[in-house]
Amino acid sequence: MTTNSSPALSKYIAQSGYCSRRQATEFIKAGQVMINGIKVTTPFTPVQAKDVVMVEKNQITQAKKVYILFNKPKNLVCTLADEKGRKTVSDVFIPFFEERLYPIGRLDRSTTGLLIMTNDGNLTQKLSHPKYEVKKTYQVTSELNITKSTLDTLLAGVPLEDGFMKVDEAFYPTDSKKIATVVIHSGKNHIVRRLFETLGHPDIKLDRSEYAGLTKKGLKTGEWRLLTPQEIDNLSDQEEKSIEKPKRPRNLRAKKFYARLQ
Ligand code: URA
């Protein structure tokens, strides 16, 4: 029987950060995993602390991995070390963890909301890759009314300098026309601000209220919590959705679009 102290082999491998649990199961079934020198082909085989596990001839080590859900306040940067010496999101966790924690993806300094902080490089790489299409939900507040036609344009697509971009969902969460919710899977820098700026909203307030199905429930701005084992499993089991499609020739389309705005 597997327990927290004797996890299933597939989970043990995934927890090490070597690969996802799904990939671990494939390695096990393909006969590429050994426990104490003996080939094991059952993913649910319990692993004891003293066991030596090898995957594809690489020994698996269990460095302690930390996964945090952080409700970022304003005025923290997401770069690793800020050249202007401003406080980074990683700095917040120095008093609490020996491990250096980094954000998965970035939020602008003035953007608030959900960020995952971790020392798991594999998960970071995976969730940052466009093919996993991780969904992010943003609340956008503008001083100007955000018209229905702006929401429709966001859904239809907007040509930006680095390609044509559309959101997955765009709607009013309340009766106010100054607040819109947008759901997007692109992780490009400043993407929501660039979209709104192009559509006549140069100065928006931005808050990320959901990331990969995780919500801010119970987390005030500036607060953080550890992810549960189930939440970590869900993140590492995110499936590949698609490879981002090649963009249409950007300049011609962008020129036409900007001409319409003049
Ligand atoms: N898009 C932006 O423009 N800024 C953020 O911080 C996140 C997404």
Image (spheres, rainbow, N blue to C red):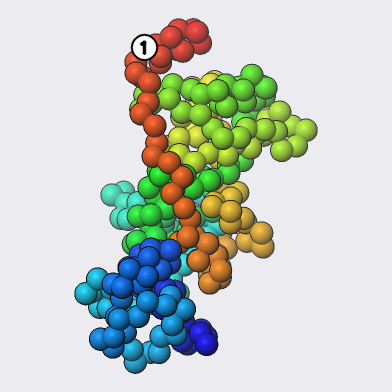
**Residue 9 in which image quadrant:** bottom left
Q: Position of residue 179 (x, y in %)?
A: 67, 34
> In screen coordinates, is 161 left or right of 68?
left
Along the viewing direction, whichever of 203 and 18 lies nearer the viewer: 18
Residue lying furthest right: 175
Q: Position of residue 55 (x, y in %)?
A: 28, 73
Residue lying furthest bottom: 50
**Of helix, strand and loop, which one carries label 1?**
helix
- Picture residue at 66% right of the left edge, 59% below the top: 217
Along the viewing direction, whichever of 52 and 100 lies nearer the viewer: 52
For disc 1, the marked residue is: 252
Kindly tell me whether residue 23 is visible in this rendering. yes
Kindly tell me whether residue 92 is visible in this rendering. no
Q: Position of residue 182 (x, y in %)?
A: 59, 36
- Label 1 CA crowd tier, 10 Å (few <14, some 14–19, many 20+): few
Instruction: Indicate the amino acid at tag 1.
Output: Leu
Along the viewing direction, whichever of 156 and 55 lies nearer the viewer: 55
Q: Position of residue 178 (x, y in %)?
A: 68, 30
Residue 53 versus residue 66 in the image, above or below:
below
